[in-house]
Image (tube, helix red, strand yellow):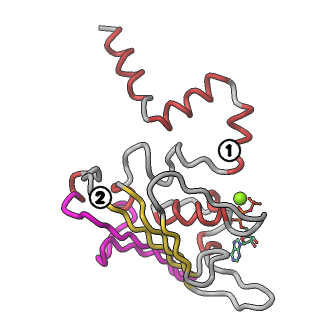
Amino acid sequence: MDFTRLRLSGFKSFVDPTELIIENGLTGVVGPNGCGKSNLLEALRWVMAENSAKSMRGSGMDDVIFAGTSSRPARNLAEVTLTIHNNDRSAPTIFNDELQMEISRRIERESGSAYRLNSKDVRAKDVQLLFADASTGAHSPSLVSQGRIGSLINAKPKERRKVLEEAAGISGLHSRRKEAESK
Ligand code: ATP
Ligand code: MG
């Protein structure tokens, strides 16, 4: 599965519709402090059905909606859409009829979130299922937030190794090796 495009509107500082084309290879997001780099990554986690407002740096999920500035009024709606190419058919089997998938999540103040997958209403659970393998998803260890870098550096080598192994998707191998050794 390749992430190819992220569209945001009314999400945190991205009040106007914004489109990020994700090319093959490494993507760097650069800019001055406070320009919205972390907000972009949060939008990606959010559309993958992140349900912790705290990990979005807010006290409630409505905090992801543009809160207004001295010159612009607040919004009542935020929407993020992620386009995925599934040419290699690596999505979980039940999604594999689809070559291109568009997942969108929108939130209205005091009404909660609604999800759509290729224009059909779906549940948060369905979106989580799409990203259920360990290397993607809102809780994937390959998404390392700003604060976690410091704690990773300060972690004991054993803990750090655990996180890196999870990110590399090889942690299952150890338990299977232990299982084999005990036989
Ligand atoms: P740094 O380089 O310091 O990590 P950054 O590029 O990661 O900065 P972000 O943390 O993504 O910056 O963006 C912070 C900005 O987003 C702040 O100016 C903050 O006011 C704004 N912001 C966050 N939530 C909202 C919201 N709901 N409405 C409007 N603006 C918001
Ligand atoms: Mg940041």
Q: Quadrant of the C terminus?
A: top left
SS at mark 1 in the image:
helix
The residue tagged with tag 2: helix, strand or loop?
Answer: loop
Residue 6: x percent and y percent? 48, 69
Say left or right for 130 vs 75. left
* Residue drawn at the location 43% of the way across and 44% of the way down: 135
Q: State the image quarter where residue 120 is shown.
A: bottom left
Q: Quadrant of ligand 1?
A: bottom right
Q: Give the range drawn in magenta.
A: 96-125
Q: Does the magenta stretch include residue 30?
A: no
Left or right: residue 163 versus residue 180 is right
Residue 75: percent from left, percent from top: 62, 87
- Camera-side residue of 140 and 83: 83
Identify the amino acid type marked 1: Arg
Count all numbered tags in the image, as a single digit.
Answer: 2
Magenta-drawn stretch, dominant element (helix, strand or loop): strand
Residue at 42 percent across and 60 percent down: it is: 3
* 1 vs 2, front mark: 2
Residue at the spot of label 1: 148
84 on left or right of 66: left
Quadrant showing the N terminus = bottom left
Residue found 42% across the figure and 30% down from its top = 170
Mark 2 lies on residue: 86
- Mark 2 residue's CB less than 8 Å from ligand 1: no
* Left or right of 151 in this view: 136: left
Give the number of the disc on residue 67. none
Q: Is residue 178 above or below residue 128?
A: above
